[in-house]
Image (cartoon, helix red, strand yellow):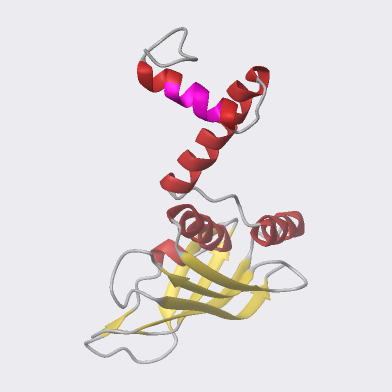
Amino acid sequence: MDRGISKGTKARGSLTIFLRNMALPPSKISWQLTLWLLIIILQLSGCRGSDPELQRNEKLWQESKIANYNFVIMRYQGGMYSWAPVLVQVRDGRAISAQPIEEVGELVKVDYEDYDTIEKIFAKIQESYRKGDSVTVIYNKALGYPENVKIDPKKGVDALFTIELSKFESIK
């Protein structure tokens, strides 16, 4: 039997000996081990803290209390299809219209349902952070809404895309 093992299995005793050799008093072993395990679990799960810039700008947007607005949205992404710019009209916080602002060909997409309000765009940004995707955002300085969002998903080949908002107009 190994010296220093008084209770538990050999593996548990080995961990205790290892931690004691790190010059940690027995009273601190428990909370420090817990802290290290928590850090390791968070790292392995890909969990990320919220981006402070996202939180600050989303709060700025919410404080503006703008519920009626228009904007043009455009998606840039490689692949077989291109995306048409779309004029989105939002009333009382809900998209009521999303119409292409130019003629649409056969291989042109116009589906912006997941991005047809500022709130949905903020939600997509947060979701991308949670997934561990690479996210770059340029926010409007006055109102906080995202003007340019670049998302490079962790999974998928050539999945990088950019969403650009322009011609934002608050409607009274």
Residue found at the very far top of the displayed protein? 7
Q: Is residue 163 above or below residue 91?
A: below
Of 41 and 69, nearer the camera is 41
**What is the x, y in percent for residue 53?**
69, 62
**Looking at the rendering, which quadrant does residue 10 occupy?**
top left
Is residue 10 visible in this depiction of the protein?
yes
**Region of the chain picked out in magenta, as a range:** 14-19
The secondary structure making up most of the magenta span is helix
> Any magenta on residue 17?
yes
The image quadrant where one finds the N terminus is top left
The image quadrant where one finds the C terminus is bottom right
Q: Is residue 101 above or below residue 131?
A: below
Count of picture labels: 0
Q: Is residue 7 left or right of residue 81?
A: right
Which residue appears at 47% of the width and 7% of the height?
6
Which residue appears at 45% of the width and 58% of the height?
132
**What is the x, y in percent for residue 158?**
31, 78
Q: Is residue 171 above or below residue 10?
A: below
> Any magenta on residue 82?
no
Which residue appears at 63% of the width and 77% of the height?
168
**Looking at the rendering, which quadrant does residue 161 occupy?**
bottom left
Is residue 34 visible in this depiction of the protein?
no
**What is the x, y in percent for residue 156?**
29, 68
**What is the x, y in percent for residue 2?**
41, 16
Of 132 and 30, nearer the camera is 30
Of 74 and 66, nearer the camera is 74
